[in-house]
Protein backbone atom coordinates (compact mmCIF):
# COMPACT_ATOMS: atom_id res chain seq x y z
CA UNK A 1 0.00 0.00 0.00
CA UNK A 2 1.43 3.38 -1.02
CA UNK A 3 1.71 6.15 1.54
CA UNK A 4 -0.19 9.42 1.09
CA UNK A 5 3.04 11.15 0.01
CA UNK A 6 3.76 8.43 -2.56
CA UNK A 7 0.21 8.66 -3.92
CA UNK A 8 0.51 12.45 -4.30
CA UNK A 9 3.80 12.03 -6.16
CA UNK A 10 2.15 9.46 -8.43
CA UNK A 11 -0.74 11.83 -9.16
CA UNK A 12 1.68 14.65 -10.02
CA UNK A 13 3.46 12.29 -12.40
CA UNK A 14 0.13 11.36 -14.00
CA UNK A 15 -0.62 15.06 -14.51
CA UNK A 16 2.73 15.60 -16.23
CA UNK A 17 2.01 12.71 -18.61
CA UNK A 18 -1.46 13.88 -19.66
CA UNK A 19 -1.89 14.29 -23.39
CA UNK A 20 -3.16 17.66 -24.69
CA UNK A 21 -6.53 16.07 -25.49
CA UNK A 22 -7.13 15.03 -21.89
CA UNK A 23 -6.62 18.60 -20.72
CA UNK A 24 -9.50 19.92 -22.83
CA UNK A 25 -13.05 19.15 -23.94
CA UNK A 26 -11.81 16.54 -26.40
CA UNK A 27 -13.82 13.41 -27.13
CA UNK A 28 -11.67 10.39 -26.27
CA UNK A 29 -14.15 7.52 -26.69
CA UNK A 30 -14.17 7.64 -30.47
CA UNK A 31 -15.68 10.07 -32.95
CA UNK A 32 -18.91 9.47 -34.88
CA UNK A 33 -18.46 8.09 -38.38
CA UNK A 34 -21.74 9.23 -39.90
CA UNK A 35 -22.16 12.61 -41.59
CA UNK A 36 -24.97 13.46 -39.17
CA UNK A 37 -22.74 12.59 -36.21
CA UNK A 38 -19.90 14.78 -37.51
CA UNK A 39 -22.35 17.63 -38.10
CA UNK A 40 -23.60 17.21 -34.55
CA UNK A 41 -20.06 17.60 -33.21
CA UNK A 42 -19.53 20.79 -35.21
CA UNK A 43 -22.81 22.21 -33.89
CA UNK A 44 -21.80 21.20 -30.37
CA UNK A 45 -18.53 23.10 -30.72
CA UNK A 46 -20.33 26.25 -31.93
CA UNK A 47 -22.93 26.05 -29.15
CA UNK A 48 -20.36 25.45 -26.42
CA UNK A 49 -18.27 28.37 -27.65
CA UNK A 50 -21.33 30.63 -27.34
CA UNK A 51 -22.08 29.31 -23.84
CA UNK A 52 -18.49 29.95 -22.74
CA UNK A 53 -18.66 33.56 -23.94
CA UNK A 54 -21.99 34.15 -22.19
CA UNK A 55 -20.90 32.56 -18.92
CA UNK A 56 -21.11 34.67 -15.75
CA UNK A 57 -18.09 32.82 -14.38
CA UNK A 58 -14.78 31.97 -16.09
CA UNK A 59 -14.65 28.98 -18.41
CA UNK A 60 -12.73 26.55 -16.22
CA UNK A 61 -12.78 22.82 -15.42
CA UNK A 62 -13.30 23.29 -11.66
CA UNK A 63 -15.19 26.13 -9.96
CA UNK A 64 -14.81 27.92 -6.66
CA UNK A 65 -17.84 26.82 -4.64
CA UNK A 66 -17.90 30.25 -2.96
CA UNK A 67 -19.30 31.60 -6.25
CA UNK A 68 -22.50 29.61 -5.60
CA UNK A 69 -24.24 30.97 -2.48
CA UNK A 70 -26.46 27.91 -2.04
CA UNK A 71 -23.48 25.59 -1.51
CA UNK A 72 -22.98 26.74 2.09
CA UNK A 73 -26.45 25.54 3.08
CA UNK A 74 -25.91 22.21 1.35
CA UNK A 75 -22.62 21.62 3.15
CA UNK A 76 -24.05 22.74 6.49
CA UNK A 77 -26.77 20.09 6.21
CA UNK A 78 -24.71 17.28 4.72
CA UNK A 79 -25.21 15.02 7.73
CA UNK A 80 -28.98 15.07 7.17
CA UNK A 81 -28.32 13.87 3.62
CA UNK A 82 -25.86 11.27 4.88
CA UNK A 83 -28.45 9.95 7.36
CA UNK A 84 -30.96 9.45 4.53
CA UNK A 85 -28.27 7.84 2.40
CA UNK A 86 -27.42 5.41 5.21
CA UNK A 87 -31.05 4.30 5.39
CA UNK A 88 -31.32 3.55 1.67
CA UNK A 89 -27.78 2.18 1.35
CA UNK A 90 -28.97 -0.91 3.19
CA UNK A 91 -30.46 -1.88 -0.19
CA UNK A 92 -27.30 -1.10 -2.17
CA UNK A 93 -27.05 -4.54 -3.77
CA UNK A 94 -30.59 -4.20 -5.12
CA UNK A 95 -30.02 -0.75 -6.62
CA UNK A 96 -29.65 -0.53 -10.40
CA UNK A 97 -26.29 0.02 -12.02
CA UNK A 98 -26.04 3.30 -13.91
CA UNK A 99 -25.99 1.66 -17.35
CA UNK A 100 -29.13 -0.29 -16.48
CA UNK A 101 -30.98 3.04 -16.30
CA UNK A 102 -29.06 5.05 -18.91
CA UNK A 103 -27.67 2.67 -21.51
CA UNK A 104 -25.45 5.38 -23.05
CA UNK A 105 -23.05 5.19 -20.09
CA UNK A 106 -22.35 1.60 -21.08
CA UNK A 107 -19.32 3.00 -22.93
CA UNK A 108 -17.69 3.84 -19.58
CA UNK A 109 -19.07 1.30 -17.11
CA UNK A 110 -20.23 -2.31 -16.89
CA UNK A 111 -21.18 -4.84 -14.25
CA UNK A 112 -22.49 -3.71 -10.87
CA UNK A 113 -19.64 -1.43 -9.81
CA UNK A 114 -21.46 1.90 -10.29
CA UNK A 115 -24.82 1.93 -8.52
CA UNK A 116 -27.40 4.72 -8.60
CA UNK A 117 -30.30 5.85 -6.45
CA UNK A 118 -32.09 8.45 -8.57
CA UNK A 119 -33.93 11.29 -6.85
CA UNK A 120 -34.64 13.54 -9.83
CA UNK A 121 -34.12 13.44 -13.57
CA UNK A 122 -35.48 14.83 -16.83
CA UNK A 123 -38.55 12.81 -17.74
CA UNK A 124 -38.18 10.62 -14.65
CA UNK A 125 -40.69 9.86 -11.94
CA UNK A 126 -38.49 9.17 -8.91
CA UNK A 127 -41.30 9.73 -6.45
CA UNK A 128 -40.81 6.61 -4.34
CA UNK A 129 -37.06 7.21 -3.98
CA UNK A 130 -37.59 10.91 -3.28
CA UNK A 131 -40.15 10.24 -0.53
CA UNK A 132 -37.48 8.34 1.39
CA UNK A 133 -35.10 11.30 1.27
CA UNK A 134 -37.21 14.39 2.17
CA UNK A 135 -34.36 16.48 3.59
CA UNK A 136 -32.16 15.74 0.62
CA UNK A 137 -34.96 16.72 -1.77
CA UNK A 138 -35.55 19.95 0.15
CA UNK A 139 -31.88 20.89 -0.25
CA UNK A 140 -31.79 19.90 -3.93
CA UNK A 141 -34.79 22.19 -4.41
CA UNK A 142 -32.60 25.14 -3.39
CA UNK A 143 -30.15 24.54 -6.24
CA UNK A 144 -31.11 26.85 -9.13
CA UNK A 145 -31.73 24.94 -12.33
CA UNK A 146 -31.13 21.47 -10.85
CA UNK A 147 -32.06 18.93 -13.54
CA UNK A 148 -30.62 15.62 -12.36
CA UNK A 149 -29.87 14.30 -8.87
CA UNK A 150 -28.90 10.90 -7.52
CA UNK A 151 -26.63 9.13 -5.09
CA UNK A 152 -23.61 7.99 -7.12
CA UNK A 153 -22.18 4.85 -5.53
CA UNK A 154 -18.79 3.51 -6.70
CA UNK A 155 -17.48 0.07 -5.73
CA UNK A 156 -13.96 -0.57 -4.46
CA UNK A 157 -11.49 -0.71 -7.34
CA UNK A 158 -13.84 1.07 -9.75
CA UNK A 159 -12.29 3.04 -12.61
CA UNK A 160 -14.36 5.24 -14.90
CA UNK A 161 -12.29 5.85 -18.05
CA UNK A 162 -11.60 9.20 -19.64
CA UNK A 163 -14.69 10.75 -21.21
CA UNK A 164 -16.54 14.06 -21.46
CA UNK A 165 -20.10 15.23 -20.92
CA UNK A 166 -22.52 16.22 -23.64
CA UNK A 167 -22.93 19.96 -23.06
CA UNK A 168 -21.17 22.77 -21.18
CA UNK A 169 -24.43 24.59 -20.41
CA UNK A 170 -24.75 22.30 -17.40
CA UNK A 171 -22.40 22.17 -14.39
CA UNK A 172 -22.00 19.25 -12.01
CA UNK A 173 -22.00 19.14 -8.22
CA UNK A 174 -20.49 16.33 -6.17
CA UNK A 175 -21.16 16.49 -2.43
CA UNK A 176 -18.96 14.01 -0.59
CA UNK A 177 -21.05 11.73 1.63
CA UNK A 178 -19.03 8.55 2.05
CA UNK A 179 -15.33 8.76 1.20
CA UNK A 180 -13.08 5.78 1.95
CA UNK A 181 -9.50 6.07 3.14
CA UNK A 182 -6.92 6.76 2.00
CA UNK A 183 -8.73 9.65 0.31
CA UNK A 184 -5.83 10.27 -2.06
CA UNK A 185 -6.59 6.95 -3.73
CA UNK A 186 -10.22 7.93 -4.34
CA UNK A 187 -9.96 10.73 -6.88
CA UNK A 188 -11.22 12.43 -10.00
CA UNK A 189 -9.33 14.08 -12.83
CA UNK A 190 -11.04 17.00 -14.56
CA UNK A 191 -8.99 18.44 -17.40
CA UNK A 192 -5.47 18.46 -15.98
CA UNK A 193 -6.49 18.78 -12.31
CA UNK A 194 -6.77 15.91 -9.82
CA UNK A 195 -9.05 16.20 -6.78
CA UNK A 196 -10.15 13.90 -3.97
CA UNK A 197 -13.52 14.10 -2.25
CA UNK A 198 -14.06 15.08 1.38
CA UNK A 199 -17.14 14.15 3.36
CA UNK A 200 -19.36 17.19 3.77
CA UNK A 201 -17.58 19.21 1.08
CA UNK A 202 -18.90 20.12 -2.35
CA UNK A 203 -17.04 20.08 -5.64
CA UNK A 204 -18.42 21.86 -8.72
CA UNK A 205 -16.99 21.21 -12.15
CA UNK A 206 -17.73 21.38 -15.86
CA UNK A 207 -18.11 17.78 -17.00
CA UNK A 208 -17.73 18.80 -20.64
CA UNK A 209 -14.00 18.86 -19.86
CA UNK A 210 -12.46 15.44 -20.26
CA UNK A 211 -12.53 13.64 -16.89
CA UNK A 212 -11.78 10.30 -15.26
CA UNK A 213 -12.45 8.65 -11.89
CA UNK A 214 -10.65 6.11 -9.69
CA UNK A 215 -11.64 4.41 -6.45
CA UNK A 216 -8.43 2.56 -5.64
CA UNK A 217 -9.53 1.80 -2.08
CA UNK A 218 -11.24 -1.10 -0.34
CA UNK A 219 -14.39 0.92 0.44
CA UNK A 220 -17.45 2.27 -1.34
CA UNK A 221 -17.50 5.94 -2.37
CA UNK A 222 -20.80 7.84 -2.43
CA UNK A 223 -21.51 11.42 -3.52
CA UNK A 224 -24.70 13.36 -4.09
CA UNK A 225 -24.48 13.98 -7.83
CA UNK A 226 -26.44 16.99 -9.14
CA UNK A 227 -26.44 18.56 -12.60
CA UNK A 228 -27.66 22.17 -12.77
CA UNK A 229 -27.87 24.93 -15.35
CA UNK A 230 -24.70 26.97 -15.75
CA UNK A 231 -25.17 30.64 -14.80
CA UNK A 232 -25.14 32.75 -17.97
CA UNK A 233 -25.85 36.37 -18.76
CA UNK A 234 -29.39 37.14 -19.90
CA UNK A 235 -31.07 36.40 -22.21
CA UNK A 236 -28.72 33.43 -22.65
CA UNK A 237 -29.45 32.11 -19.15
CA UNK A 238 -33.17 31.86 -19.92
CA UNK A 239 -32.45 30.26 -23.29
CA UNK A 240 -30.06 27.76 -21.72
CA UNK A 241 -32.57 26.78 -19.02
CA UNK A 242 -35.18 26.26 -21.73
CA UNK A 243 -32.75 24.19 -23.80
CA UNK A 244 -31.86 21.99 -20.83
CA UNK A 245 -35.58 21.58 -20.12
CA UNK A 246 -36.07 20.13 -23.60
CA UNK A 247 -34.01 17.15 -22.51
CA UNK A 248 -37.24 15.52 -21.40
CA UNK A 249 -38.04 15.03 -25.11
CA UNK A 250 -34.82 13.15 -25.86
CA UNK A 251 -35.58 9.47 -26.66
CA UNK A 252 -32.67 8.16 -24.55
CA UNK A 253 -33.88 10.10 -21.50
CA UNK A 254 -37.45 8.94 -22.03
CA UNK A 255 -36.14 5.37 -22.10
CA UNK A 256 -34.17 6.03 -18.89
CA UNK A 257 -37.35 7.32 -17.29
CA UNK A 258 -39.19 4.11 -18.18
CA UNK A 259 -36.39 1.96 -16.79
CA UNK A 260 -36.29 3.94 -13.55
CA UNK A 261 -40.07 3.60 -13.18
CA UNK A 262 -39.84 -0.14 -13.81
CA UNK A 263 -37.15 -0.53 -11.15
CA UNK A 264 -39.14 1.45 -8.58
CA UNK A 265 -42.30 -0.57 -9.21
CA UNK A 266 -40.43 -3.83 -8.87
CA UNK A 267 -38.40 -2.76 -5.83
CA UNK A 268 -41.09 -1.04 -3.78
CA UNK A 269 -43.64 -3.65 -4.70
CA UNK A 270 -41.65 -5.97 -2.47
CA UNK A 271 -41.43 -3.63 0.50
Image (tube, helix red, strand yellow):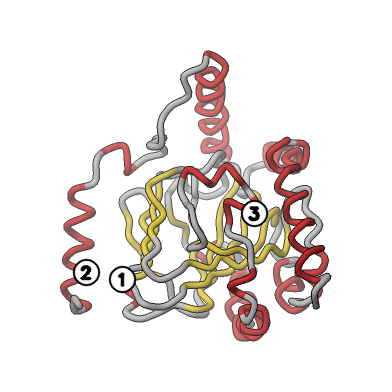
Q: Which residue is mark 3?
A: 228
Q: Nearer the viewer, residue 263 or 31?
A: 263
At label 2, counting other C-alpha atoms closer than 10 Å, the crowd grade (few under 14, some 14-19, many 20 or more) is some
Q: Nearer the viewer, mark 1 or mark 3?
A: 1
At label 3, counting other C-alpha atoms closer than 10 Å, the crowd grade (few under 14, some 14-19, many 20 or more) is some
> How far from the left and from the top, in percent, is residue 76?
60, 82
Mark pair 1, 3: CA separation: 28 Å
**Image quadrant of residue 54?**
top right
Q: Which mark is residue 8?
A: 2
First along the sequence among labels 2 and 1: 2
**Image quadrant of residue 169?**
top right
First along the sequence among labels 2 and 3: 2
Q: Nearer the viewer, mark 2 or mark 1?
A: 1
> How far from the left and from the top, in percent, is residue 103?
60, 45
Mark pair 2, 3: CA separation: 31 Å
Q: Nearer the viewer, residue 269 or 124?
A: 269
Mark pair 2, 1: CA separation: 9 Å
Q: Which mark is residue 185?
A: 1
Q: Nearer the viewer, residue 234 or 95?
A: 95
Q: Secondary structure at mark 2?
A: helix
Amino acid sequence: MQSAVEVKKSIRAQTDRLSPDLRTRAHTLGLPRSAIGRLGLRLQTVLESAVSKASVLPDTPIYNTADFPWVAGLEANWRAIRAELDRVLVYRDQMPSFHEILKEVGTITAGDTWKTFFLQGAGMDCGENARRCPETMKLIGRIPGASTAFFSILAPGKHIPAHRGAYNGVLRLHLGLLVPEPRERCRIRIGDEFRSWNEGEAMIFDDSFNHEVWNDTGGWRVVLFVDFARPLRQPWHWLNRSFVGLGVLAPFLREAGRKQAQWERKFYGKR
